[in-house]
Amino acid sequence: MTPDRASPYDVIVIGSGIGGLSAAALLSKLHQKRVLVLEQHFVAGGLTHEFQRHGYHFDVGLHYVGAMGPGEPGRKLFDFLTDGTLAWNKMPPLFEKFIYPDFSFDVPSDPKEYLRSLQEKFPGEKEALAKYFKDCLKAAVWYGVETMVETFPGLLRPLVALAARLGGGISRQTTKAYLDKNFKDDRLKSLLASQWGDYGLPPSQSAFGLHATIVEHYRKGGWYPVGGAVELARKITPVIEASGGAVKVSQRVEEILVEEGRAVGVRVRPSNSSKGLPVEYRAQAVISDAGSYVTYSRLLKSAPAAYQEELETLPKGLSAISLYLGFKESPTKLGFKGENYWVFEGEDHESPNPELEKSGSYYLSFPSLKDPQSTGHTAELIVFCEYDFFKKWSGQSWKRRDKDYYELKDRLTEHFLDLLDKRFPGFRNLVGYKELATPLTVEYFQQTPQGSFYGIPGTPSRAGKPWARVTTPVKGLYLTGADVFSLGIMGAAMGGVKTAGMMSGPFGFLKVMEKIFRKKPLLVEVKPLRG
């Protein structure tokens, strides 16, 4: 990949999600590439961006991250991506609470204490629990190996693929299959699957390797970026600009330009104006962080028909409604400390919220209590649901939908405020601002099919699919983000590492990883703004 001096950029990245930003920053930092990142939204960051209302700051997709302790893999990666300018705040020692109708469990950030607490609560499953955490580590490793097969060159690739097929069976079974085989207590099975919202698939559909990856990711607790989720894009952007690159917002890519079988650029139209004329940007390489489905079904006119057909038949994954709340006083008044709450109306995870207006299950997060620099207290409630609840309004414009859509949003808001106030008396009295977003909101701002949160769902059959690879049938076109690695913030960021590595030549991924992880920890001083 050599620079084209006729163009001001060497590489174009479609989308400023964390996968796109990570790939852009690594190519800029390690190879001095001039990278242009194009974002269709009017703010950068993808699902790591924030929005503001009346002095309140709300995140939209980053609610907590694991492996961010000093020296841990996540911290080393983000220290490298941001030149050590991004600080992280640790959540409380009991960072998650799983609440069911007749029992609850507080999750400690000490893995040994976690196992001990589970064994005390379920003494009849003591040995199975010890085996479970060993199996989670094993399954997570094999899940990672299957994800990384394409990074190995030449003759090594089929050998690694064979090893993954032979040894990775534990990761390819469903989470439900593993739990049913190894545990007798149905309450414990439900409890161990409580974090399924972190990857958006109930136990009967998710790959156990993906579930295990999440378990391992949070085994030492949760962390939150100081200054809020917006700091990721804010701190990575200067690294991209330092090599002559840029991050441009309100730029909707309409087509990936292909000439003689090679990607040569993109055609873009301003997304903040219906009258804007299309503009072409050209470069030696194009990276899509728009996801496999959008890339092959919308942006690439010459996409293989087989890819398009299979992607069309895949489930699009769950979306969610999000209720954003601003408080008149600190929620610490009610005893909250910044921990997450997973509240379930029953032990069955397989039928999420058949009737939204009667649903009693939700995830509750307090971003302002996780961020020492927050200036306004906030909470966010998330309820996973099917897109079909809102499909009838999908063809209507943002902020101009039928009256019954907004009436439904109001009813849902009041329903969940009632639930919160019933469980946490006095909650409603603290609320000074409320706003509810639906899957149509996610679909509009993120351009994800049916407002899905996590890209291509992490089912057992996803591993090894050609449309989930970094390399594509078009020379000079690469994919990045969650679809080429794993789901969530860290999965998408590692997708960026994988893409930058594969664009760096033979064993490029291993070379990039070596540069990231040999770097000494960088210390960032955190100055709380809240009294």
Image (tube, helix red, strand yellow):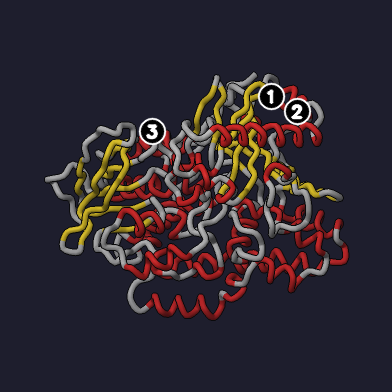
As shown in the figure, which amino acid type bears the numbered disc 1? Answer: Val
Front-most of residues 516 and 38 = 38
Residue depicted at 36% across the width and 70% down the height: 306
Relative to 224, is 302 on the left or the right?
left
Q: Position of residue 283 (x, y in %)?
A: 20, 49
* Nearest to N terminus: mark 1 or mark 3: 3
Q: Position of residue 505 (x, y in %)?
A: 29, 63
Quick check: 173 above or below 360?
below
Front-most of residues 349 and 62 = 349
Task: Residue under label 2, please give it.
Answer: 427
Quick check: 223 above or below 112?
above
Work out how far the residue at label 1 is from the one at label 2, CA to CA, in angstroms: 7 Å
Q: Are marks 2 and 3 in contact (CB under 8 Å)?
A: no
Front-most of residues 440 and 140 = 440
Relative to 2, is 220 on the left or the right?
right
Task: Residue under label 3, please give it.
Answer: 42
Q: Position of residue 451 (x, y in %)?
A: 50, 47
Work out how far the residue at label 1 is from the one at label 3, CA to CA, in angstroms: 28 Å
As shown in the figure, which amino acid type bears the numbered disc 2? Answer: Phe
As shown in the figure, which amino acid type bears the numbered disc 3? Answer: Phe
Relative to 193, is 245 on the left or the right?
left
Residue depicted at 63% across the width and 57% down the height: 216
The answer, for residue 79, to whether it is visible in the render is no
Q: Residues within 10 Å of mark 1 (few under 14, many from 20)?
A: some
Work out how far the residue at label 2 is from the one at label 3, CA to CA, in angstroms: 33 Å
**Disc sitting over residue 431 in the figure:** 1
